[in-house]
Amino acid sequence: MRFRDSAAIVLAGWILMAPSVDCARQGLQRETPLSEWEQVDNFTAQESCENYRSIVIEAEKSDSGNVYVERYSYSICVQADDPRLKGK
């Protein structure tokens, strides 16, 4: 890998993506493509994204029956230039 290739990866950043909450069905839309998930926040490093995700999951666990606990347990950190974000 050349330096400019690695620099592009660093500049891309990371995004915490979570499935949308389907309010009408009271459930999660887990099978939807990543391009239709909600962007929760942006980060400069994968570690920061993963740490934030863990903090949110722990914070939401205190509220039993909270759909957001499940939502964030399915959330993922992806690079901002991940092709799955573009859809078809």
Image (spheres, helix red, strand yellow):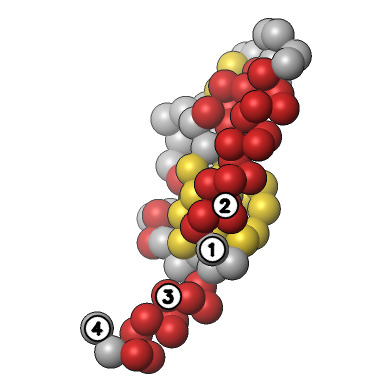
Q: Which mark is residue 75?
A: none
Q: Amino acid at mark 2?
A: Cys
Residue 44 x/y as whole percent:
59, 67
Q: Quadrant of residue 67?
A: top right
State the residue position of label 4: 1
- Asked whether residue 48 appears in the rendered view, the answer is yes
Q: Quadrant of residue 87?
A: bottom left
Q: Nearer the viewer, mark 3 or mark 1?
A: 1
State the residue position of label 2: 49
Q: Amino acid at mark 3?
A: Ile
Q: What residue appears at the point 42 percent right and 75 percent down from the top-left corner?
A: 9
Q: In this orientation, which residue lies closer to the viewer: 42 or 61?
A: 61
Comes first in the chain, label 4 or label 3? 4
- Is 11 above or below relative to 39? below
Separation (CA) of disc 2 from disc 4: 24 Å
Separation (CA) of disc 2 from disc 1: 7 Å
State the residue position of label 3: 9
Comes first in the chain, label 1 or label 4? 4
State the residue position of label 1: 45
